[in-house]
Amino acid sequence: MFSIQVLRLSAATQDLPKSVICNVHGVNPKFLEIGERMAAADKEEGGDQKFSKGAYFLGKMVWAKGYRELIELLAKQKQDLNGFKLDVYGNGEDAHEVQSAAKSLDLNVNFMKGRDHADDSLHG
């Protein structure tokens, strides 16, 4: 196979000859608008607004996106995280293995199909 140049979307990917890092996606303007809207609402309410939905992890469901580290940390801190719930959003080739690993450790993780950071279901 001949290649003039290899485009990598992140420095986390394998470094290959003739490769350059080029993030072609950028930031969705809707995501920035959500941040601005939430910051304005927080300021109006005296700066005490809290995220009340718990926590979420969003990313393509492949081990390279940090799922192994996430599961290991949740398992290690399981006693301290009593009652803590995590929603995980993602699709990917490692989805079955990731979900099986979390289930085998009896972690309080709710897996759902992937969605964009700007999805209304995450921000209300």
Image (cartoon, rainbow, N blue to C red):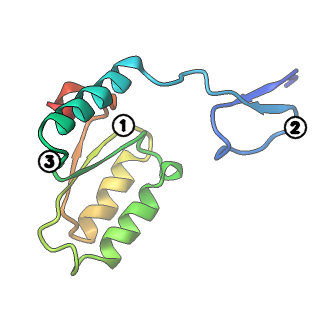
| Above or below for 83 versus 43 | below
Q: Residue at x 34, y 63 (%)?
A: 101
In terms of image quadrants, where is residue 19?
A: top right
* Residue 104 in the image, given as x and y percentages of width and height: 27, 68
Q: Quadrant of the N terminus?
A: top right
Tell me the kind of residue under disc 3.
Lys
Mark 2 or 3, which is nearer the eye?
3
Q: How many marks?
A: 3
Q: Quadrant of the C terminus?
A: top left
Could you say which disc has been placed on residue 91 in the image? 1
Tell me the kind of residue under disc 1.
Asn
| Above or below for 68 versus 94 | below
Specify whether 95 is left or right of 43: right
Q: Tell me the residue that label 3 is attached to.
A: 53
Q: Residue at x 78, y 31 (%)?
A: 20
Tell me the kind of residue under disc 2.
Pro
Q: Tell me the residue that label 2 is attached to.
A: 17
